Structure formats: structure tokens, C-alpha cells
Image: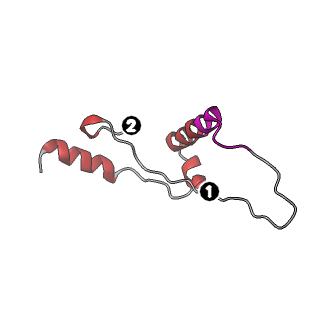
């Protein structure tokens, strides 16, 4: 395997991707990413908090999915 690919694989092995938002918030880098995403959602007006109707309606759930973004040449963003 070429050295640049070995370095990339080694770097990926050392990164723990959280599976829950509570886990992500314990890590400053992931917490910063969560905060940036929340600000983007608010800035774009993609959601709002409202009261539920009285007739046993359930709120729409959501789930955070964490992954890594890569720039050109495999650099992690």
C-alpha cells in the first residue's frame, strides 16, 4: 500500500465516530460540529418548536448521524 494511503488508514483507525449525541458532546471537536449544525439549522429556518395538538399526537423524532467529511486528497475536514 502506498505510504499516503497507509497514513490515511492509520489516521482513520484512531478516530472514534460517536453513535449518540450524548457521546459526541463529550468530545470538544464533535461538540463544536453539533453546535455548528444546530446554528445552520436555525439560520436556515428548517425547524421550529411548537406545541402538540391535544389528541394524543406524538412528536416527530430525530436522530443524529455522525460521520467524517473528507476534503481533496483524503484530508479530514
Tell me residue 33's x, y (percent): 52, 40
Q: Compared with residue 15, is residue 37 higher up or lower down, i.e. above or below? A: above
Number of callouts in the render?
2
Left or right of 69 in this view: 35: right
Between residue 16 and residue 44, name the one nearer to us.
44
Residue located 55% across and 53% down the image: 64
In the image, residue 57 lies in the stretch drawn in magenta? no
Between residue 17 and residue 39, name the one nearer to us.
39
Residue placed under numbered mark 1 in the picture: 62
Tell me residue 26's x, y (percent): 57, 48
Secondary structure under tag 1 reads: loop
Q: Which of the labelled discs sits on residue 21, or is there none?
A: none
Residue located 67% across and 43% down the image: 47
Q: Main secondary structure of the magenta part?
A: helix
Q: Residue furthest top?
A: 43
Crowd around label 1: few <14 · some 14–19 · many ≥20 (10 Å): few
Looking at the rendering, the stretch of residues picked out in magenta corresponds to 38-48
Left or right of 8 in this view: 18: right
Between residue 53 and residue 26, name the one nearer to us.
53
**Earlier residue among tags 2 and 1:** 1
Tell me residue 27's x, y (percent): 53, 45
Q: Compared with residue 14, is residue 56 higher up or lower down, i.e. above or below? A: below
Q: Name which quarter of the figure residue 40 lies in.
A: top right
Crowd around label 2: few <14 · some 14–19 · many ≥20 (10 Å): few
Which dot, 2 or 1, sits closer to the camera? 1
Residue placed under numbered mark 2 in the picture: 77
Residue located 63% across and 32% down the image: 43
Amino acid at each position: 500500500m502506498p505510504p499516503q494511503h497507509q497514513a490515511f488508514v492509520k489516521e482513520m483507525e484512531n478516530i472514534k465516530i460517536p453513535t449518540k449525541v450524548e457521546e459526541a458532546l463529550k468530545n470538544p471537536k464533535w461538540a463544536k460540529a453539533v453546535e455548528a449544525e444546530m446554528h445552520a439549522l436555525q439560520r436556515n429556518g428548517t425547524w421550529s418548536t411548537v406545541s402538540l395538538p391535544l389528541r394524543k399526537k406524538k412528536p416527530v423524532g430525530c436522530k443524529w448521524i455522525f460521520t467524517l467529511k473528507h476534503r481533496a486528497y483524503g484530508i479530514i475536514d
